[in-house]
């Protein structure tokens, strides 16, 4: 069965030293300190060590073959967003990353689908880059769960979502810049507690801010099975019912109405939770995702889904049909190898 992993990250092997180039800021750069490994540095601070599978496309294709997965949807690593930078510098950095992904997709069209990144801090520049992305064969963008601590329903971001809808570009909302990060450094809590909360923050902002209501054709996917949104939908819907004066001030539609309107990936590490997600969302809005190549990801690329008692139809949805619909791509692109 065709398998498309809807959530993976990639970087170019070499990147300019943006801090030197722009003359300010703690931009990320790579130190290739030993064979097969690189240190991601933020200014002078060590951020994380990555392995060759973060940049080597052929190695990745081989690793995926072990899990019978042919296609990877690739996007950058959220720490590269650089929404805090001067807009034109962020645009230049974004274009560098986007061109790298566009070239990769051109070279390996049966193995890679690309998502871009745009300067969300400047809607006008972002929309210009969206139009360019469309032309160079990128199928959507990845954005942060907040933009410099502002929620996604802020008016200034609306033209970006509007352009995505108009251009038919998919959107992946990825948690980052986690709330409370500084107050919970111990035990990896920003990743274990902050990330799921961030994703729920993004979904709630988009629902209550009326983004989905105003842009019904916008195709949005939320990482990590929607974070804590789906597990706490009862609480969120009850809040909407009991305190409409606080919750329903910008959109009077019940949040449950949006279940199955947006997409989520399968990164739950838990079959019971995935069953619940499937029940709430419908299988045509749940897709295989891994967060490869990072350790908190599902690095067996959905093996636990194979082991679940699901019908073939549900597996087809999860493994490729949902992702194809989200991205606006035809299945034949990947099954007809002569093309
Ligand atoms: Zn991720």
Image (cartoon, grey):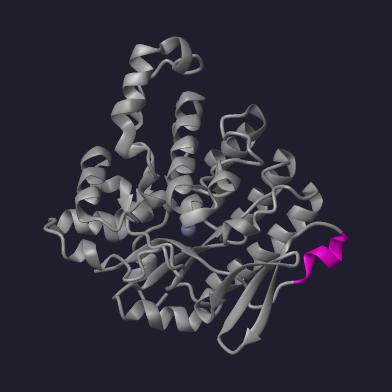
Position of 90 with respect to 255 (left or right) is right
Q: Which residues are magenta?
A: 16-23
Q: Quadrant of residue 134?
A: bottom right
Q: Residue furthest right?
A: 23
Position of 113 with respect to 233 (left or right) is right
Quick one: 183 or 87, which is closer to the camera?
Answer: 183
Position of 69 with respect to 139 (left or right) is left
Spot occupied by residue 4 in the image (x, y as percentages of width and height): 36, 64
Q: Residue furthest front?
A: 186
Quick one: 44 or 312, which is closer to the camera?
Answer: 44
Q: Quadrant of residue 226?
A: top left
Image quadrant in which the C terminus is located: bottom left
Spot occupied by residue 1 in the image (x, y as percentages of width and height): 24, 69
Q: Quadrant of residue 256?
A: top left
Quick one: 60 or 187, which is closer to the camera?
Answer: 187
Spot occupied by residue 231 in the image (x, y as percentages of width and height): 30, 39
Count of picture labels: 0
Quick one: 137 or 179, which is closer to the camera?
Answer: 179
Position of 97 with respect to 251 (left or right) is right
Q: Residue furthest top?
A: 245
User: Is any part of residue 215 visible from this angle?
Assistant: no
Query: Measuring 41% from the left and 56% from the top, which residue is drawn there?
Result: 329
User: Is any part of residue 45 visible from this angle?
Assistant: yes
Eyeballing the image, is 54 above or below 210? Answer: below
The question of residue 77 being in magenta is answered with no
Query: Measuring 17% from the left and 55% from the top, which residue is drawn there?
Result: 313
Query: Measuring 25% from the left and 68% from the top, which residue is drawn there?
Result: 303
Eyeballing the image, is 226 above or below 297? Answer: above
Spot occupied by residue 142 in the image (x, y as percentages of width and height): 55, 52
The main secondary structure of the magenta stretch is helix
């Amino acid at each position: 069965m065709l398998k498309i992993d809807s959530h993976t990250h990639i970087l170019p092997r070499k990147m300019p030293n943006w801090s030197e180039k722009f003359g300010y800021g703690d931009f990320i750069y790579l130190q290739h300190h030993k064979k097969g490994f690189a240190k991601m540095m933020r200014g002078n601070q060590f951020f994380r060590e990555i392995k060759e599978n973060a940049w080597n496309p052929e190695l990745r294709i081989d690793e995926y073959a072990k899990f019978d997965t042919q296609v990877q949807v690739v996007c950058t690593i959220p720490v590269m967003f650089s929404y805090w930078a001067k807009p034109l510098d962020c645009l230049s950095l974004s274009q560098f990353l986007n061109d790298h992904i566009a070239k990769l997709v051109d070279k390996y069209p049966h193995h890679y689908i690309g998502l871009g990144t745009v300067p969300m801090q400047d809607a006008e520049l972002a929309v210009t880059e969206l139009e360019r992305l469309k032309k160079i064969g990128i199928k959507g963008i990845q954005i942060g769960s907040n933009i410099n601590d502002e929620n996604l329903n802020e008016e200034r971001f609306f033209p970006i979502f509007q352009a995505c809808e108009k251009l038919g570009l998919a959107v992946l909302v990825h948690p980052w810049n986690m709330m409370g990060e500084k107050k919970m450094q111990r035990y990896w809590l920003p990743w274990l507690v902050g990330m799921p909360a961030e994703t729920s923050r993004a979904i709630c902002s988009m629902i209550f801010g009326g983004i989905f209501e105003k842009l019904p054709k916008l195709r949005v996917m939320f990482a990590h099975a929607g974070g804590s949104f789906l597990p706490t939908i009862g609480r969120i819907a009850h809040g909407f019912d009991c305190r409409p004066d606080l919750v329903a001030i910008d959109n009077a539609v019940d949040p449950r109405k949006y279940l199955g309107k947006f997409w989520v990936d399968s990164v739950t590490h838990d079959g019971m939770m995935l069953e619940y997600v499937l029940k709430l969302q419908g299988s045509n809005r749940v897709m295989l995702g891994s967060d490869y190549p990072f350790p908190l990801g599902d690095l067996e690329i959905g093996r636990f889904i194979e082991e679940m008692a699901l019908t073939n139809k549900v597996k087809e949805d999860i493994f490729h049909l949902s992702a194809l619909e989200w991205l606006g791509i035809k299945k034949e692109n990947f099954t007809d190898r002569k093309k």
